[in-house]
């Protein structure tokens, strides 16, 4: 496909979407101006393509050629199907906050517990809170999200709050051939301790939709956050999620991401360790088959001294699927005593499976401990033979070895209940394959 032609067609389609949707987008005149500026920033860059280094392996001009119209507000039928879809993934005791086709569904959501407050992005924008759409990021998809964000959540956790149960943000798609743009802002106060779970789920009848999400999260001094993101969108859907995290002094952040759905997906996380003594642990798993394309891209910015980061990523790729992992650790000048390590491993289950692993280090300080590594390979034939010799069918033997491979990353989740939830998601993928 001609690249220049693709840019022109996609640009016209996206411009048409923005123009057609402006009257539906919430916000004051000031907010509308911020949206216009964000869309102009997107237009200057255009839809990401392989000539942009950060998007080298995920060319959206090829992978997302069609621009879907904004989804309509969910009706009674959509809410009913969404309610059925959330039941299998709802965590017992968690406070559920549900977005259906990009719109907050109060009738499906719970009240937040004491110490937490929540309003919707729509309400905040209609009150003139345009700063919720502003970021310093230069990524085109973040700018596009700011221009078209329809709804989301604005969550505040008070200083010192210790939530006994998780907050669960659930994105439920019920539409066909439509798009949803959501954006959430989460502030976790000093000394607070929170577990947050994000789910992306398709209801019955949902197909060929596009989910565009952005999360802006700040973690106060000495705060602790465990965040698990489970993406099991429809197999013909597209999901582009951008997450920006900022850590205060002596904060602790554990992040886990599972990608097991969607035809095309990209999860890009930008983490800034902005306070001394902060600690980051990132674990992730791509579980891909068919012709799925799953991209996990992480940028870890050590901006101050005495911070620690660990990244452990696993990919299991079957059929003609394509997994991408890009991890970059930046150590800024003056960020002495940084300890940053990254390891990514890919398991290829077919001759046509593809894995691109690109770990990077950029170090501008001289007293640091940093390292990275990457491997890719097939299942161990000797171990397979051992299991099959003891009566296991080939697929069952493979599943056992895959579970052990994935479990190395999942075991990094400290919370027992949350670890079980993540492992169950991986086991469902394995059962479907078997």
Image (cartoon, helix red, strand yellow):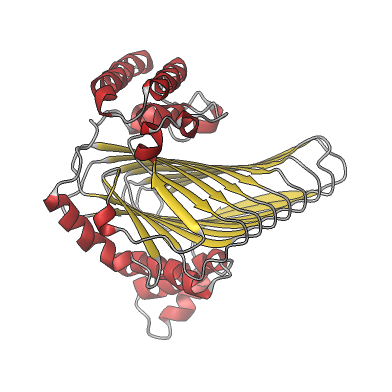
Q: Residue furthest bottom?
A: 390
Q: In which quadrant is the C terminus drawn? A: bottom left
Image coords of residue 288 (percent x, y):
38, 53
Left or right: residue 373 compared with residue 399: right
Above or below: residue 370 compared with residue 225: above
Q: Position of residue 263 (x, y in %)?
A: 32, 44
Residue 208 vertical position relative to residue 395 in the rendered view, above or below: above
Report which quarter residue 415 is drawn in.
bottom right
User: Residue, x 43% and y 83% (percent of image)?
Assistant: 389
Camera-side residue: 123 or 1? 123
Query: Which residue is at the front of the view, 28 or 281?
Result: 28
Q: Quadrant of the N terminus?
A: top left
Does the rendering let one see residue 182?
no
Residue in the picture at 51% in, 51% down: 156
Q: Is residue 333 above or below residue 428?
A: above
Horizontal side of 32 relative to 159 (left or right) equals left
Q: Would residue 375 appear left or right of 66 to someone viewing this image?
A: right
Furthest-right residue in this view: 367
Residue found at x 46% / y 29%: 130
Residue 15, horizontal then vertical, whole percent: 31, 18
Left or right, 308 with reference to 44: right
Q: Position of residue 43 (x, y in %)?
A: 41, 17
How many dots with numbers?
0
């Amino acid at each position: 496909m001609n690249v220049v032609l693709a840019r022109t067609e996609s640009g016209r389609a996206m411009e048409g979407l923005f123009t057609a949707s402006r009257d539906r987008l919430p916000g004051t005149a000031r907010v509308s101006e911020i949206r216009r500026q964000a869309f102009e920033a997107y237009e200057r860059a255009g839809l990401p393509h392989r000539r942009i280094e950060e998007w080298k392996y995920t060319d959206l001009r090829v992978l997302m050629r069609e621009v879907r119209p904004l989804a309509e507000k969910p009706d009674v039928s959509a809410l009913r199907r969404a309610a059925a879809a959330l039941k299998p993934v709802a965590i017992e005791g968690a406070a559920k906050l549900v977005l259906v086709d990009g719109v907050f569904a109060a009738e499906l959501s719970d009240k937040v517990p004491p110490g937490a407050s929540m309003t919707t992005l729509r309400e905040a924008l209609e009150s003139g809170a345009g700063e919720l759409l502003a970021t310093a990021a230069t990524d085109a998809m973040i700018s596009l999200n700011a221009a078209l964000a329809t709804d989301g959540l604005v969550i505040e956790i008070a200083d010192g709050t210790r939530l006994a149960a998780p907050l669960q943000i659930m994105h439920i798609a019920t539409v066909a051939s439509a798009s949803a743009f959501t954006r959430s802002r989460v502030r976790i106060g000093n000394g607070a301790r929170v577990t947050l779970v994000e789910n992306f789920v398709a209801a019955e009848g949902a197909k060929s939709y596009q989910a565009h999400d952005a999360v802006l999260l700040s973690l106060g001094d000495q705060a602790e956050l465990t965040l698990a993101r489970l993406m099991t969108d429809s197999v013909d859907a597209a999901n582009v999620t951008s997450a920006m995290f900022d850590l205060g002094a002596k904060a602790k952040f554990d992040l886990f991401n599972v990608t097991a759905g969607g035809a095309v997906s990209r999860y890009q996380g930008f983490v800034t360790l902005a306070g001394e003594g902060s600690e980051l642990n990132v674990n992730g798993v791509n579980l891909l088959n068919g012709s799925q394309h799953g991209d996990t891209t992480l940028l870890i910015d050590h901006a101050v001294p005495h911070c620690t980061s660990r990244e452990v990523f696993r990919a299991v790729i079957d059929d003609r699927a394509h997994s991408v992992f890009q991890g970059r650790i930046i150590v800024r000048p003056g960020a002495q005593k940084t300890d940053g390590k990254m390891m990514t491993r890919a398991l290829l289950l077919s001759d046509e499976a593809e894995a691109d692993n690109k770990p990077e280090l950029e170090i501008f300080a001289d007293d640091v401990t940093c390292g990275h590594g990457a491997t890719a390979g097939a299942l161990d034939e000797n171990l397979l033979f051992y299991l099959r010799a003891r009566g296991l069918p080939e697929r069952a033997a493979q599943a056992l070895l895959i579970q052990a491979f994935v479990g190395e990353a999942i075991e990094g989740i400290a919370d027992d209940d949350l670890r079980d939830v993540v492992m169950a998601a991986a086991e469902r993928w394995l059962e479907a394959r078997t």
